[in-house]
Image (tube, helix red, strand yellow):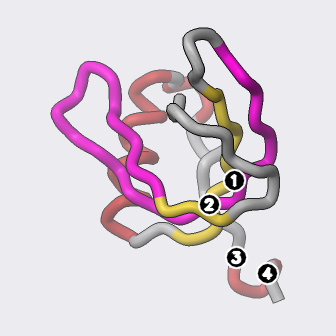
Amino acid sequence: MVDREVQVNALLEFTLMLPEHDQTVSAHGRVIRAVSGEEDAFELVISIVDIESREHLTLRQYLSEQAPDTRGTLEPPNKSETG
């Protein structure tokens, strides 16, 4: 959630605070959807477009702890698939 309106397609640098962990993950992303919430807050759906390897590993580990049955679905695409 953010405290100001953000336009769809905007590029952002952001930091996620991982619940129940003493870690954060920073990355760059594109806003896919923005919805106004309660108390002048906005919920964003962001597609990550750039993330450092160390941050990516931290995020993957966190997500796999949250949903261990999805192993393998968080793998980055092969270089040959991205052009």
Question: What residue did someone put label 3 on?
Answer: 78
Residue range in magenta is 14-37
- Residue 16 colored in magenta in the image: yes
Q: Amino acid at mark 2?
A: Gly
Question: What residue did someone put label 4 on?
Answer: 82
Q: Secondary structure at mark 1?
A: strand
Asked whether the beta carbons under mark 1 and mark 3 sit within 8 Å of each other, the answer is no
Question: What residue did someone put label 2 on?
Answer: 29
Label 2 crowd bin: few (<14), some (14–19), many (20+), radius 10 Å: some
Q: Secondary structure at mark 4?
A: loop
Question: What residue did someone put label 1 on?
Answer: 47
Quarter of the rendering containing residue 78:
bottom right
- Residue 80 colored in magenta in the image: no
Label 3 crowd bin: few (<14), some (14–19), many (20+), radius 10 Å: few
Q: Is residue 19 above or below residue 80?
A: above
**Disc 1 to disc 2, C-alpha distance:** 5 Å
Q: Amino acid at mark 3?
A: Asn
Q: Is residue 57 left or right of residue 39?
A: left
Q: Nearer the viewer, residue 4 or 25?
A: 4
| Residue 10 percent across, percent down from the top left | 72, 61
Q: Secondary structure at mark 3?
A: loop
- Circle 4 or circle 3, nearest the eye: 4
| Residue 14 percent across, percent down from the top left | 46, 54
Q: Is residue 50 above or below residue 56?
A: below
Q: Magenta residues: mostly which secondary structure?
A: strand
Q: Earlier in the sequence, mark 4 or mark 1?
A: 1
Residue sitting farthest toward the left: 22
